[in-house]
Image: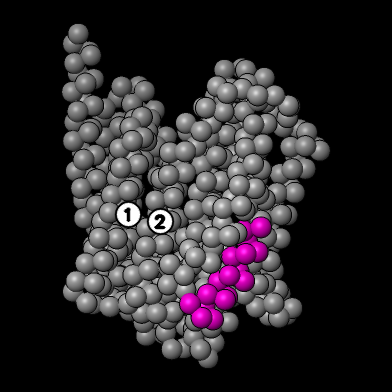
């Protein structure tokens, strides 16, 4: 838990940045807000791949250090960095010629498409930098140096928050200014990590030329499932964007973009708790202590539910004030009422989150990664997408149908996941009892 605290702080700061970024862009109008909303899931798929390789790098470096295998740790770090650069260049080759078609398929058109292309093209050229930043940060975490990993993320995020208004409004770059601010902040964060790793050289790992198919396989074995788990959420948002455009046009996307950033901010304490659930249930499983495992899971769910309800109540009461923050421009005022409605409906999403999220974390803790991936896919791509589609296209409920579809999909999948988790704990209990008696 001690090692996870710096990363929880970094995660909080990043979420504050995402919120602030949306607020600054909101001043440019609803089309600008819609344009970053349409590109957001695509950008998050890129981040998912980078974060997945980073998780793989972190895990393998930590394993090799635990084995006192210095050479293996060096190989893992070096190959992870090389892999990040190669995949980054491949990312440019894939997304640069296809981004226009991807955005059009999501519903972008006219000025919104033009703005989305202005914004996205700059970030696509920065994919190698994004990859390096995430993977190099993973190497630091693998060493247990979560403090400097946190510093790199928080400094970059605060720099981005500061640069956004300068580039957008002072230099009058508009939507391009938001992209330039993001790239420069990532570049500065990357420079910090590169300085520690390659110039100051006070880290445990050193970088070397060499190849190990076995270590590469270990990195990918951990990294690919981690990427898939995060990418499923981005794919779901991409599909939900399509539904939102059909139901509410550019204004609908602007509403969804703004409100979803608020909801994500509300999930930060729950994500931090999820990290602890994985660690505690994993340790309990290793000790074959079923009581500790069950208590940790249920206590976390109960506490998480109370936190979710508390944040939900805050959002319900503060919805008019929150909506004003995203509608301070003349054009933005047209979505004020829709924002208030969306906040009050999507706020209901939060109480159900712990039941699914913490059960998924428990699955990870006891080594059932496949089950964890299955419930993530069920929650995002299956349930939320299905119910939103049903409300919008079958019941013809327009924008409100997307919001209720997300809430209902999350609630149903959370209930199924929690019940599955309870049955899993019972089966683990029987397994432990059988092994003791034999």
Report whether 413 appears left or right of 60: left
- Residue 252: x and y in percent read 39, 77
- Residue 134: x and y in percent read 60, 46
Q: Nearer the viewer, residue 69 or 395?
A: 395
Task: Give whichever of discs 2 and 1 has the lower sequence position.
Answer: 2
When asked about the image quadrant of residue 407, the answer is: bottom left
Q: Is residue 104 above or below residue 41?
A: below
Numbered circle sitting on residue 235: 2
* Residue closest to the far bottom: 330
The answer to whether residue 23 is visible is no
Q: Identify the residue at horizontal 57%, vertical 23% (top origin).
A: 213
* Residue closest to the far top: 438
Q: Identify the residue at horizontal 24%, vertical 72% (top origin).
A: 393
Indicate the secondary structure of the residue bearing disc 2. Answer: helix
Q: CA distance from mark 2 to mark 1?
A: 7 Å
- Residue 228: x and y in percent read 43, 44
Q: What segment is highlighted magenta in the picture?
A: 109-125
Contact (Cβ within 8 Å) of mark 2 with mark 1: yes
Numbered circle sitting on residue 381: 1
Q: Identify the residue at horizontal 46%, vertical 88% (top origin).
A: 333
Query: Magenta span: helix, strand or loop, mainly?
Result: helix
When asked about the image quadrant of residue 214, the answer is: top right
Q: Identify the residue at horizontal 51%, vertical 27% (top origin).
A: 218
- Residue 97: x and y in percent read 58, 60
Pick the quarter of the image with the C terminus. Answer: top left
Indicate the secondary structure of the residue bearing disc 1. Answer: helix
Report whether 209 appears left or right of 88: right
């Amino acid at each position: 838990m001690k090692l996870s605290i710096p990363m929880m702080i970094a995660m909080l700061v990043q979420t504050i940045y995402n919120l602030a970024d949306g607020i600054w862009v909101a001043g440019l109008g609803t089309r600008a807000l819609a344009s970053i909303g349409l590109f957001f899931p695509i950008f998050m798929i890129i981040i998912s791949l980078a974060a997945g390789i980073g998780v793989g790098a972190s895990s393998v470096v930590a394993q090799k250090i635990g084995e006192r295998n210095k050479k293996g740790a060096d190989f893992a770090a070096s190959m992870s960095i090389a892999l990040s650069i190669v995949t980054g260049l491949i990312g440019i080759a894939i997304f640069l010629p296809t981004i226009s078609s991807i955005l059009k398929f999501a519903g972008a058109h006219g000025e919104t498409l033009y703005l989305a292309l202005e914004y996205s093209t700059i970030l696509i050229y920065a994919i190698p930098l994004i990859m390096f930043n995430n993977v190099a940060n993973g190497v630091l975490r693998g060493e247990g140096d979560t403090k400097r990993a946190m510093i790199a993320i928080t400094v970059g995020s605060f720099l981005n928050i500061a640069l956004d208004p300068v580039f957008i409004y002072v230099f009058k770059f508009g939507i391009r200014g938001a992209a330039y601010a993001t790239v420069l902040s990532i570049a500065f964060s990357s420079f910090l990590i590169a300085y520690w790793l390659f110039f100051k050289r006070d880290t445990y790992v050193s970088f070397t030329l060499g190849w190990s198919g076995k270590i590469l396989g270990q990195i990918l074995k951990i990294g690919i499932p981690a990427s898939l788990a995060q990418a499923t959420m981005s794919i779901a948002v991409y599909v939900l964007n399509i539904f939102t455009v059909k139901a509410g046009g550019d204004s609908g996307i602007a509403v969804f973009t703004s409100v979803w950033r608020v909801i994500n901010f509300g999930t930060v304490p729950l994500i931090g708790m999820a990290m602890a659930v994985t660690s505690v249930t994993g340790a309990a499983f290793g000790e074959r202590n079923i009581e500790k495992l069950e208590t940790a899971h249920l206590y976390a769910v109960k506490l998480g539910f109370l936190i979710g309800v508390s944040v939900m109540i805050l959002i319900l009461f503060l919805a008019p004030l929150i909506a004003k923050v995203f509608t301070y421009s003349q054009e933005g005022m047209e979505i004020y009422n829709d924002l208030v409605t969306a906040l009050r409906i999507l706020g209901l999403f939060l109480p159900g989150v712990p039941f699914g999220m913490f059960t998924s974390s428990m699955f990870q803790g006891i080594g059932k990664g496949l089950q964890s991936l299955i419930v993530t896919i069920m929650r995002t791509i299956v349930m939320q997408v299905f119910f939103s589609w049903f409300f919008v296209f079958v019941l013809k409920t327009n924008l409100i149908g997307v919001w209720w579809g997300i809430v209902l999909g999350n609630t149903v999948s959370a209930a199924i996941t929690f019940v599955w988790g309870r049955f899993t704990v019972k089966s683990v209990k029987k397994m432990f009892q059988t092994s003791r008696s034999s």
